[in-house]
Image (spheres, grey):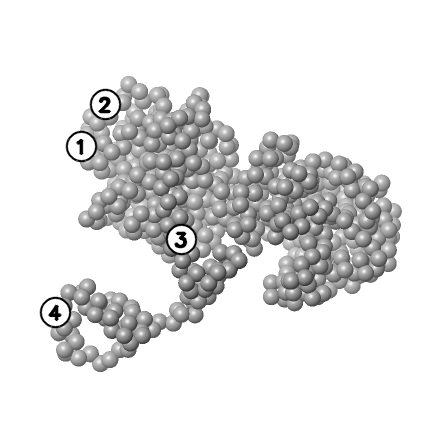
Amino acid sequence: MQRVGVFLFYDKDGIVDGYIDHYLKELRKVTEYLVVVVNGKLTPEGREKFSKLSDDFFVRENVGYDVWAYHDALDYIGWDELKKYDELILANYTLFGPLYPLSEAFAAMEDKKCDWWGLHRRYENRSITTYFGKPLKYGYLPEVTLSNFWVIRKKLLHSYEFWHYWANIPPISSYIDACLYHEPTFTMTMCDAGYTFDTFDGESQRGVYRTPTIQGAYDQISRLKVPFVRKKAFYDPNGTLDLASDVPQQIFKYLAEHTEYDCDLIWENLLRTVNQYDLKNWLNLNQILPMDYSVAKPAHTAIAVIFHAFYIDIMERYLHNIAAFPEGTDFFFTTDTEEKKAELQKLLLPYENRFQITYSLVENRGRDVSALLIGCRDVVLSKKYDLICFMHDKKGLGSQSAYTNIGQSFSDCCFENIAPTADYVNNVVDLFNRQTKLGIAVPPPPKNADYYKIIGGSWASDANYPNVQKLLSQLNISVPLDPQKPPVAPYGTVFWFRPNALLPLFEREWRYTDFPVEPSANDGELPQAIERAYSLIAQGRGYYPSVVMSSSYAEQEVTRMTEIAHTYVDLTMKHVGCYHFLHIATNQFSKVLDAQSMPIAVPQKSPNVLKRVVKACLPRFLWEFLRKIRCRIKGWTYIPEN
């Protein structure tokens, strides 16, 4: 069997990741001649790779998507030359694999009586008449084989119909056009001409999943033994978590336990190309760890704890967190005055027989962030430690409010999810040892009282996003960013990390003058940008972040988040009614809010003396209460006065 292969590659930065190396090496085993066609640009390293991994390759302008790339590649090979081959493979970069030897897939399909076959089937749906708002050519969505991997057999390959199709394909200007005018048109044209197709995944998933290659991806690779998995199974920008469940993690677990495929090849590409917010949600990067027993007691892991102590009056609150670390842990305490240092030494005297404790003075400029980056820079760069836990005492809003428990709840959220007990600390260390791509572990964002605004993460001040962009650029870190998608940050700046994951941040020589003078703002400045950049730097270094929480806190988290979700769904139902998927209902709710966004204020009349006198005499709450009543009677939207 003589096969020729065409492989389409595209990456917006022209970078060829390791999964492509593996793919092409395996593709070479089942082809006699392999051509790679590159849409867009290609790095010098990429050119070097393709020169070794293919028989020939060329770079073309990124127009026409995969359809016109295949068209140009077929012309490049030549139609007379194609007559020498029994089969043609058209494949592209949107798949991870092969997970199993390709020879097995070809052997499994050998007895299938068809003229071309693919990996994945998209089932017919006659109820769908438009696709992303565009009318479908045939009036419905026909059954097709996805064009990510096609094997064209001899009868079709050497036919007039096949040549005529590629000689007359229309311009393709978008992904939607490719879906509308290529896969359905090719399928219907060839079927109308009397040719037949089949797919490796068969028909057993019909009616089970809306998109079998995404929601049913685990079933495909485990039960059906499909040799590839779509990249979209790990993150689909047009998909919904309503349907995705825990599929990506199931896939990772299966690949690690039942195949020889290197999962790091998948991580390398995802961490470089997918926004961190989406990675966390699609891959469920949350870890719930027990507090009262250890999964394992890790040995030979060098741990350092860096603790910045500013509020000495509340340090006793954290003694049980300090005691949770294993004997032999190195502690580095920083503070800003000799008096505080003396109090710290007195308070921690009982622990000096368990830990090696070092005390140092830092300037109170940049707070905990400068204490870590400047005061303890040498600790991180020493290469002595496998893991470092950073902590600092925290009052939060409690220092500005009559209710100190608000800030204490935030502090508890940080500390009781980072180091509440000795067993929990062992479990965190074990987690890092097992998950070699885990670079930083952070507590969940707080959601009590005024902190509810941070649910799911937050850029907070408008200045933080551009400040983070600037910082990452200075550190030569490139990761996908989106002002609508906050990072998995350690809000509160209490977290675990691998020194290598944050290395660029510590290699830079920071100065105290880089930070704002105290008293500084609590948002929109360099410390807040660094707080949101920690996990992004780790991602740029090839590591993922994870939210860790204790089993005890997870119980509270479920209760609180269920309450919040119920409130949100109740509001959505009230304004837009019930929809098939929550994300659709959310979009409708957003449209309703946008339509009502025109400000409707109480009509402004000429100020009169009586109004000014009454307003001056009444307490503000009573004045606003009366205004609310008036607005309700008049049917106006109430807007508080400044």
Mark 2: secondary structure: helix
Which residue lies under the disc numbered 3? 566
Q: Where is residue 499 in the image (x, y as percent from the top left)?
A: 43, 33
Q: Is residue 584 above or below residue 352?
A: below
Q: Which of marks 2 and 3 is nearer the N terminus?
A: 2
Q: Earlier in the sequence, mark 3 or mark 4?
A: 3
- Residue at image location 29% in from the left, 35% down from the top: 308
Quadrant of the frame with the C terminus: bottom left
Which residue lies under the disc numbered 4? 617
What's the residue type where badge 2 is placed?
Leu
Q: Is residue 572 above or below residue 397?
A: below
State which quadrant residue 47 falls in.
Answer: top right
Which residue lies under the disc numbered 2? 349
Q: Is residue 461 above or below residue 301?
A: below
Give the distance between the C-alpha atoms of the residues marked 1 and 4, in whole angstroms. 50 Å
Give the distance between the C-alpha atoms of the residues marked 3 and 4, in whole angstroms. 42 Å
What's the residue type where badge 1 is placed?
Glu
Q: Residues within 10 Å of mark 2 (few under 14, many from 20)?
A: few
Give the distance between the C-alpha atoms of the residues marked 4 and 2, in whole angstroms. 59 Å
Q: Earlier in the sequence, mark 4 or mark 2?
A: 2
State which quadrant residue 186 falls in.
Answer: bottom right
Q: Residues within 10 Å of mark 1 (few under 14, many from 20)?
A: few
- Residue at image location 15% in from the left, 74% down from the top: 612
Residue nearest the observer in this picture, 83 or 46:
83
Residue nearest the observer in this picture, 301 or 621:
621
What's the residue type where badge 4 is placed?
Cys
